[in-house]
Every structure is written in C-alpha cells, then in structure tokens.
Amino acid sequence: MARDLVFEIGVEEIPSAPLYAATTQLTSLAAAALKDARLGYGEIRVAGAPRRLVLIVEGLAERQDDLDMRVKGPSVKAAFQDNGDPTGAAMGFARGKGIDVSELERGEESGGEYVYAHLRSSGLPVAEVLPAVLSKLVGDLDWPKSQRWGRGSARFIRPVRWLLALLDADIVPVTFAGLTAGRTTYGHRFLSEGAIDVPAAADLALAHERGKVIADGETRAQIIREGIEAVAAQAGFTAVVPEKVFAEVVNLVEYPSVAVAGFDAAFLRVPREILETAMESHQRYFPLQDAEGGLTNAFVVVHNGDPDRTDAILRGHERVIRARLSDAAFFYDEDLAAGMEGWVARLESAVFQEKLGTVAAKVARLEKLTAALAVMHGAGPDESAAAVRAAHLCKADLVSHAVVEFPTLQGVMGRYYALAAGESAAVADAVLEHYRPRFAGDAVPASVAGLLVSCADKLDTICGIFALGQAPTGSADPFALRRAAIGVLAMVLDGGLKTHLDEAIGTAFAGYAGVVDFDLDEVGAAVKSFITGRLETMLRDRGFAYDSVDAVLAVAADDPADALARTQALESARATDAMADVAVAFSRAKNLSDTEVGSTYDRALMGPSETTLADAIEAAEGRIAGAVAKADYEGALALLAGLRAPIDAFFTDVLVMDADERLRGMRLALLNRFTALFDGVADFARLQGPAR
C-alpha cells in the first residue's frame, strides 16, 4: 500500500535567493535519494517559506525494491595472482560491495574476462529506511554560506529549530543537529499560537493554515501579485513591479498582506531613479505611477504582520521611507551645488586599478582613445566633440554623494548632473549610455557619442588588465573582460559602430606607455585573439556554421561588422548547388596547387578547356575585387559560382599532373590563380562541405 510522507525542516529566516536554490535542490536530491534507496513513489513536491523547507512525497512504496544486480569489477588478470590468490583490487572491490572475496563471480564481456559481484537482498520496510535517507538529505543541501550554532558540528544556512517527519500518521525519527523529528510544526512567528501538533501527513497543510503560514511559494506569489494589482487599481494607479524585487519579496513573507502607503510629494523633485532605487532595492516597495507613466508619491507595501494592524504597519514604513528620501534629496541637492568639473578633479583620489593608476588617469586615456575611435568611425565634428566631452565627464558622478549612496545609478546620475551643468543632451546621453551594454542582450548605446565612449571605456579596461598579465583564465574573470569584449562587439555588430580591432587595440595600448611594462606585440596579439574568440562565439550563436565562421575570421577578423556580412553571404551561397560544386572544385584545386609555381601561365600551351578557364578567371578577377571593395559579398560569391562550368570542364578534360613539366606548370599556375580568387572573401580551405 502506498503511503504519504511529509518532512519539514524548521529554521530561522532563510534569505530569499538561497531559499529558491534550496527548494530546487531539495526536489532533485530527494528524487536521487529515493532512487538510491530503491523506494518507488508517485510524486515529489517541495515548498519553501522563510522559516521552513517542506518535502512532500505522495504514493511512497511500503517497502524497498528487492536488490538483485550484477556489478562489474576489475579484470580477472588484475583481480587474481597467477597462483589464484586475490589481489588488493579484488579484495577492495568485494569489500566495497559488502561481500566476501570468495563470492566474486567470473564472466566474459567484450572479449575480456572480469569479476562480478552478484548483490542480492530483500527490501526493508520504508519506515526503517527513511530516517537515514532524510537525515542525509538535510546535510546534502548546499548553501552559499552556512553556519554552526550551539555546541554541535552540523552546518546549515541558519539554525535549525525543529524537524517534522510523518509517514502517514507515524513519526519518522529523523535526526539532525541534535534534533529528532516529531509531529510538531510551528506557525507564523507573530500570528500563530506557537507549537501545532500534526496528526498525520495529510494534515500538514491544515496545520499551516491554522498557523497563518502559506508554505508554497507559487501560492504566495499569486496572492501578492493579485494584491498589488488590486490595491493599485483601487488607488487609481499602476504598480511598477521589477521581477527581481517581486521574487525576493515572495520569499520574505509567510503570510503576505498588501497595502498602499505614501510619502511627501515634495520628494518628487528628486530624479525618479533615486526614488525607485530607495523604494525597491532598499525597502522592497513597489512604486505607483499615474496613467501618463509619471511617478506618484504612493507605493505598495507587502508586509508579514497582522493584517488587522496594517494601518500602524504602514505608518512605520512611511517613517522609514521618509528618512531614506530625506537623505536622497540632501545628496542630490549637495551634488547639484558641487558641479561636475570639481568631481573630475577628485577622480585623482579614486583608484581604477592599483597598478594602472587612478580613475582620473583612465579618463585622460578615454578622451584620447575616444577621439581616435571617432576618426575610425567617421564621426562628424559635432559627434566627435560630444563624444570627447562625454569621455571627460563619464566617470565624474562616481564621487558624487548620490552614486556613493546608490552605486547602481552611476551614469544615470551623471546624465542628470551633466544636463544641470548646461551640457548638451548629446553629451549627457553619452555619459549615461557609456556603461551599455551591461550584460548579454542589453541595449547598445543609441547615440554615436555613446558608442564611442563605451567602446573606449571597455577597450581601455581590457588592454590594461591584459598588460598586467591578468587575462581571464577558465571561469575566473574578476574584471568582467569577457562581458566587456562582447559589449564592444555588440556595438559593432548591432549598433553600427565602425572600427578596426588592430588599430583600436594599438591605440588603447598607447595610453599605457610608461604606466606598466609589457610586450606590445605579444599582449596586443593576445587581446586580438581574446576578442576574436568572443566574435567567433557570437557568430556561431547566431546560427552560422562553425566552418563558415572559421573561414571568414581567417581573413576578416579585424573588422567584426565586415566579418558578419561575409559570413551571412557565405552561408547563403553555400546553400546553393552551384556554390557547393565550386567549393568542391576549390578544395580539389587547393590540394593540387603549388605556390612555388606562381600564377603566371603561358597561353600558347593551353587547350580549349584551359583557355576557357583562363578567360573566365581573368574576366572575374577585376569584378570580384570590385565587389569585395564595396563589401558586396553576395555579388562576389555569385561571380565565383559562375566559374562552375569552366572549372568542371577543366577537371574533366585535363590531367593536371601531366608528365610534361611545362604543361603541368601551366595548369598548376592556372589553378593557383583560380584559388586566389576566393581569398578576398574567405579561406575556403577551412570549409568542410556544403551548408545545407
């Protein structure tokens, strides 16, 4: 008869993020543990709230499955000496399987002879197996940080205060951290009656309800979301609900109540981002906005207190946010009075990297690098001037009061302060945008000035850290250089930034002359390879064949935008029959070609097929070069595909490796000239076959 199990770990308040991870872990760990214990079951469910983790197993088997399995061990040669005595390998294998070495069996497999352990045992009742299984389950939970308490040696993210384990109505005596499981749970810390006895596994949900606890996170999330929508609609507003903040709030409460509070409307003169950061990140409130999208002085509070005392609870939250916003307004006013140029000077006291100097030194490098990138991009005078000015101011807000208090607003506050100081919108927007893209999928800067400063900032960091010999290794990337390289490439591929990696990298390294000792050629090549590696991954992630990407990057890695255009054209061309056949002919020609022969041939030695191919090659050379010069790679590849007929006829009618040295040399020179046509588009020798 199938049985139901509930196992509750009662604990002091678990932080939100680790609680999410623990519920996921507990599901997989429980499934693996029951499988290892040979216990069948119907369904596993896990619930988590700040003060508890709950495992529910429905349809648990009454007994373990009987064990009858044959386990392969070492080969007979390794298991027994020549005189038949067992070796250490045999004895260790037998000991590990809980049998005597004399019980080992022999058998043949895949042409060899091995020893086997035949394990047999009758399944035990589930009640005898579960205590050890569940105790190990608690200890196997992996936490980012754990602690010990009292005099015990057990570790957990927070002190464990009770254990409940019921198999139907029977207690499962699980032990952990000096506790033994019983049938007692505890309700809400403030709203419950204290200890609550649970008669049977099926009664745990009722006990939670009685104790004012909603253990299931999805249920709490639904209640909170519906509550936010309801109170916002009642107030005539809509709520701003960042999913990250919402997810955190779900795991901060066991019995949520939702209500609207407010703050003094005078604080609305402070930039919206400061107010939202103070409400969301610091207090986990949800701001309310009006029909036009303007921020209001009302916000939603999700609390874990007594619903009957909501008014008093809201007054407490209003006192807290008033203090927060008063500080924010003071910081903002002080910053406006100070001005950005003063902050630029103060960057001399801010360290960029211990061996690379101050942030002020970085800003000086950024101004020069931005100007060089503007020339590379072909920016107009106004765009160049705005970019260089933005580079001068882009880090100034790092020493402002507001950003020191709210670090996530760097760039955001810089834009506000630039506008307040009379800078143009182009400069102010670039100060904000130069941090973008901040992560994969983030928007790239919308303005040319923003693109230029952002690219300069990221290249400067990459080159500086590489010059120190601290390039990323394995998964370690403390300076987020991979993200910076991907950001540079995203701005080129998706943002329209025009740049050449060799020149940009060389210019960035010029800013470090005299700052740190490094081999420019060696480190420059390493940075180029590092960025090209990210480009290869990005192109493959866009669905391009690995060999198409490889073929293009072999000739066009210096210009990522050009590499993208070539790869797109090559992928399309490879899907056609004509291009596929020409690629095969290229491969054959490349295998026969001899660079020592050169590409000069004597037409007087040619027959019809050779003459036809030579005419086709000479007619195509200028047109292909012109198409490549205009980045018309589709046109260039179409011209190459047009050589299918003459190259096919050549290989059909002609023996390239003729015994006559003059004929052989002429034909090889012709093939050299044929393969050279492809070099302007991609390295076709790297293609493995047609991309269908």
Image: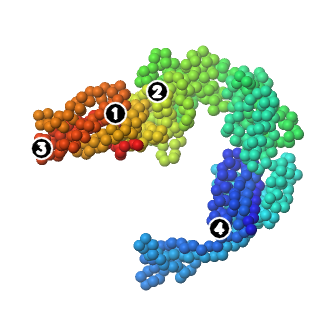
Name the element at disc 3.
helix
Which numbered marker is on residue 497? 2
Question: Measured from the top left, where is residue 488 in percent x and y?
Answer: 48, 32
Where does label 3 land, which residue?
661
Rounded to the nearest whole Å, what is the CA distance between mark 3 and mark 2?
Answer: 53 Å
Question: Measured from the top left, where is residue 151 in percent x and y?
Answer: 74, 60
Rounded to the nearest whole Å, what is the CA distance between mark 4 and mark 3?
Answer: 77 Å
Which numbered marker is on residue 38? 4
Question: Hey, what amino acid is under mark 3?
Answer: Glu
Question: Measured from the top left, where is residue 269 in percent x and y?
Answer: 72, 21
Question: Hey, what amino acid is under mark 2?
Answer: Leu
Name the element at disc 4.
loop
Q: Mark 4–mark 3 contact, CB under 8 Å? A: no
Where does label 1 land, which residue?
637
User: In which image quadrant can residue 96 be found?
Assistant: bottom right
Q: Earlier in the sequence, mark 1 or mark 2?
A: 2
Q: Nearer the viewer, mark 3 or mark 1?
A: 1
Residue at x-position 34% and y-position 43%: 686
Q: Earlier in the sequence, mark 2 or mark 4?
A: 4
Relative side of 410 to 646, left or right:
right
